[in-house]
Image: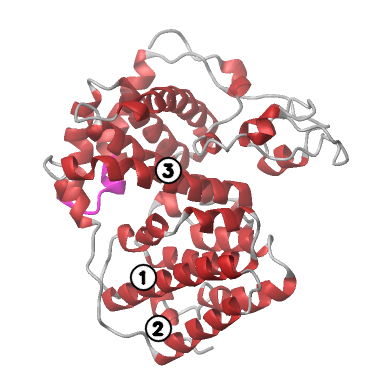
Amino acid sequence: MAGDMQSSRIGHTKSRNGCLRCKQRKVKCDEQSPCANCIRRNEECSLTSYNSQETSPQSSLSPDPYNFLLLSPGDLPNTSTWAQDLFLMSHYVTSTCPSVGHSQAVTHLWQTYFPEVATTHPFLMHGMLAFSAVHLSRMRPRDSARFEMQSQYHLSLALEGYRAQLPHLDESNYVAVFVMSAILAVLSISTIATKPGPALHEPCPFPDLLAFLSLTHSIKHITATCWGHLATTPLNAMMYEHQIAPHDTPLPPHLIMHFEALRARIAADQDAEAASTCTDCLNQLQAVYQNVLALAPRTFRSGVVVTWLTHVPSDYVNLLRRRHGSALGILGHFVVLWELLPERWFTNNFGPSALRSIAGEMEPEEAQFWLTWPQGILRPEPTQKVEEALGSMEL
């Protein structure tokens, strides 16, 4: 890891004629038609005429679920230094690992076992350094630009190596791929969660929320391949800490009535296939609510909530891409649950930010029906905790 990081990339002149999506994300736009950022994210660019009958070859491709974590290639630094990397690894071990470990055993895995695995898998080492740099950018706001550039450099190299491993999964790389998948999951959540400051009450860009869901889906399929082998490794402690058996504790009557009303709304959809998909996803989400309320107010793991994302079918994600009203409404009920998790730097304000983003994609009448209840849950009385509001709030 040689050379000095190019300081000229840290700041850049603001684009006056950039596309709307780049302005929304506050990133540099190359002002081409379409711009490089929109091509990379497989999004419609405002610089391209809506009346154009030509279709870019890029538009026919499925979006890469990892690209939303990166800046455009022209914004990436191209070097790193040994001293910077040493500092990042020190911070990773002493601060980042304890911030994500749910127990002493899991923290130990992050601090000792994972770095040992990374010594023979450079892409994972870059992933850890990127993870550390993102954490530092949140912990040290004054230096956030510098650490964000370092994270982008290491993440670009990590993703390059990670993608190369995916077609060749076997026992030699199962652990490294699984750990990198876990890092990507956390980084994707932190991309959606808002940073402290003026943007705290702004919605996250919906395409980023959609990319987060797509990334989670891709990770599910990757880890399914190696799950059996991982259970025989030290990762066993981490895997089963995130599993939970279904609880028989019934939901409060008002919540049962609420879910029944949602099912009735879905049943009225003239698209029978979409209605079937949404009903299945809502039933699965109701089971997650049941688990959450059975565990509250005890501390429970993020896996209790994330399990829903790992079980929804690809058809549901496609409905979200189409901005289907019921699919968006169900997602609004899902993001509420994030506010029940123990506070972490990478989930800061995730629920409210995501809910505002979802509301912006819905028709007013649909939003009023589907989101009034979730919005009320995320605005409890000042002395009332979210889990108390969830268990007691009437329709």
Q: Earlier in the sequence, mark 1 or mark 3?
A: 3
Residue 134 on the magenta span: no
The number of callouts visible is: 3
Q: Which mark is residue 25?
A: none
Residue at image mark 3: 218
Left-right relation of 277 to 116: right
Residue drawn at (61%, 16%) of the image: 8
Task: Please indicate, yes or no, whether residue 150 appears anywhere in the rendered image.
Answer: yes
Mark 2 or mark 3, which is nearer the start of the sequence? Answer: 3
Residue under label 1, please give it: 288
Q: Crowdedness of circle 2 by 10 Å Cα count: few (<14), some, many (20+)?
A: some
Residues marked 3 and 2 touching at CB (< 8 Å)? no
Whether the residues at callouts 1 and 3 have beta carbons within 8 Å, the answer is no
Question: Hey, which quadrant is residue 139 in on the image?
Answer: top left
Work out whether residue 9 or residue 233 is closer to the camera in this orientation and state it.
233
The CA distance from mark 2 to mark 1 is 14 Å
Give the class, few, some or many, for how many residues have Cα within 10 Å of label 3's Cα (few <14, many ≥20): some
**Residue 255 place in picture, x, y as percent:** 44, 85
Q: SS for tag 1? A: helix
Q: Relative to residue 129, is residue 52 drawn left or right?
A: right
Magenta stretch contains residue 99: yes
Measured as percent of width and height from the top left, residue 258 is found at 50, 85
Q: Answer whether residue 349 is visible to the viewer in this image.
A: no
Amino acid identity at mark 3: Ser
Residue of label 2: 391
Farthest residue, direction top: 3
At 38% from the left and 43% from the top, the residue drawn is: 219
- What residue is shown at x 37% (from left), y 34% (from top)? 132
Q: Residues within 10 Å of mark 1 (few under 14, many from 20)?
A: many
Start-end of magenta stretch? 97-104
Give the foreground label among 3 and 2: 3
Q: Amino acid at mark 2?
A: Gly
